[in-house]
Image (cartoon, rainbow, N blue to C red):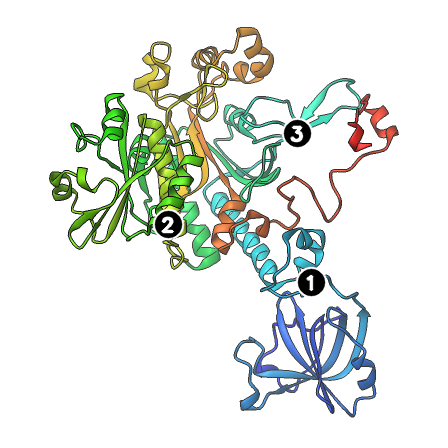
Amino acid sequence: MLRTHTCGELRKKHVGSEVRLCGWIRRLRDIGGVIFIDLRDRYGRTQIVIESGADFFDEVKSLSSQDVVCVEGVVRARPDDMINPEMETGEIEVVATKVELLNESKTPPFVIEDNINVQEETRLRYRFLDLRRPIMQKNIILKHRAMQSVRNFLSQNDFIEIETPFLTKSTPEGARDFLVPSRIHRGKFYALPQSPQLYKQILMVSGFDRYFQIVRCFRDEDLRADRQPEFTQIDLEMSFVSQDDVIQLTELMMAAMFRDTLGIELKTPFMRMDYFDAMRRFGIDKPDLRYGMELLDLTDYFKGTEHRIVASALEKGDRAIALPVSADLSRKEIDSLTEFVKSEGAGGMLWFKFKGGKTSGQLSKFVPASMLKELKPDDPSTYLILLGPDIEVHSIAGKLRVEVANRLKLTENMPNEWRFLWVVDFPLFEWNPDENRIEPAHHMFTAPHEEDIDKLEIDPLSVRATHYDLVLNGVELGSGSIRIHNRKLQERIMKIIGFSEEEAQKRFGFLLEALEYGAPPHGGIALGFDRIVAMMAGVSSIRDVIAFPKTTAAQALFEGAPDRVAEEQLKELHIKVIYDEEEN
């Protein structure tokens, strides 16, 4: 080994030891008769001292930041007034007897430190340097530890890790597939899996009653901070289980992960909330429970009101939904929020304030005394009121709630508050107005509630799914469900969403056939691993916990992908690419 110790390892007990360290020069200070080098590797930092009498003193002067060196020397204790409490090795330093330049570095395009102001595109272009920053290494190491925790927990609970194919059949799962042309089978394509959904169900039919995989998934969809075209999920499936079984095991796994990686003990069981209750109270199916501001239905209070706009809306059957904000919002803030709800599709917003025991503002003359008596508003508070059809107005009010919380920075001082929530009993189907048809709310393999099966063909939109989402601080971490394990029921679902028998057989014949050979009741969950780690690391983008992520334009700036390929490769695949004029 070139090194005897790492740069984060030496302590007072090593004083007098001869050591050899290797790393990158973080900083070099020449103060005349002495040169100090702050040497760093992924384990930490050590101060190196080169005294003027060293025969390599002048050579060291020519070294630069990010040069990689090997240092031989003797550990000595720092004087008490020179101890650096910010460094784990701050009580010692190494007096160099030899410094060898292993490789020099060009001047980096940005400073290799944590708190830098540089465009993300530059960071991704020079990802090999960005990953050298301590915070990025900390994030990647955190991810590694979380991954090992999951593997250990599931292995200890009799789960078998089984790999599933990356080259598979294209099936509709809600997002576009990445297609891979086959050279051997002319004109045919593989698809990269959006998830191992069908494979894990087949594994249950095969008798592996507890499967898991920390698996790469691929979706060709529009990107944002918490999305990537390729991402990692914790995928698990269990046979002979109920919804409660899957939920309880997932809670224990999350508790183990937080305990092993952050030293935090999570309180279980997590809170549960019905989907319709979540929409009614928060206007969103992934509410952040760290702050209040529950939506209020003021429809009944305003019945018979003389306010023309409100009265007209209520006559049409619209609802009056209020967001109570425990703050005296300024008129400028209210006007800005009005523009926000208009951008989300609302016609506008009404409001009133309660301060000093009195009402003021737009609706103040029309606020019934009975409403104030029953609601007992905070003083001061501002009530932001939306009018509209039930589902639509709740949804916009939910977005308004999140926007207000962000603007007021309600969660800014809550770094260690982990509010987990299970949202359950989702609708099995939803209406797609653009295509004028019913479609699965999640995926077509989710089992309906047993007591709702008789309503499938009569009133499908009222059927509840055995589906559950895990939410943390307003972020959906993953989804799961109990699956359909009966062919006839699976075919009924496919027929309701518009699949003909021929199409169902063509696309999913292999699954339908497997369900006829003793498929057990089964269910599972898929959790967004990158998203979980990003929240644990306290970063807003999953790109900061992925070693080599793509940009929001799905580009890999470091290696320059995607890129054109040689004509010979396209000919082998029987593909011809037609470029637009501006691309030539």
**In this orientation, does residue 231 appear?**
yes
The residue that disc 2 covers is 332
The residue that disc 3 covers is 178
Which quarter of the picture shows residue 510? Answer: top right
Q: In this rendering, is residue 140 above or below 171?
A: below
Q: Which of marks 1 and 2 is nearer the N terminus?
A: 1
Which quarter of the picture shows residue 55? Answer: bottom right
Amino acid on which the number 2 mark rests in the picture: Lys
Helix, strand or loop under label 1 = loop
Helix, strand or loop under label 3 = loop
Residue 276's x, y, as percent? 31, 30
Residue 570's x, y, as percent? 83, 27
Helix, strand or loop under label 2 = helix
Amino acid on which the number 1 mark rests in the picture: Phe
Q: How far apart are marks 2 and 3 (CA)?
A: 46 Å
Badge 3 crowding class, 10 Å Cα cut-off, few under 14, some 14 to 19, many 20 or more, is: some
Amino acid on which the number 3 mark rests in the picture: Phe
**In this orientation, does residue 149 appear?**
no
Q: Earlier in the sequence, mark 2 or mark 3?
A: 3
The residue that disc 1 covers is 110
Single out the mark in the foreground, 1 or 3: 1
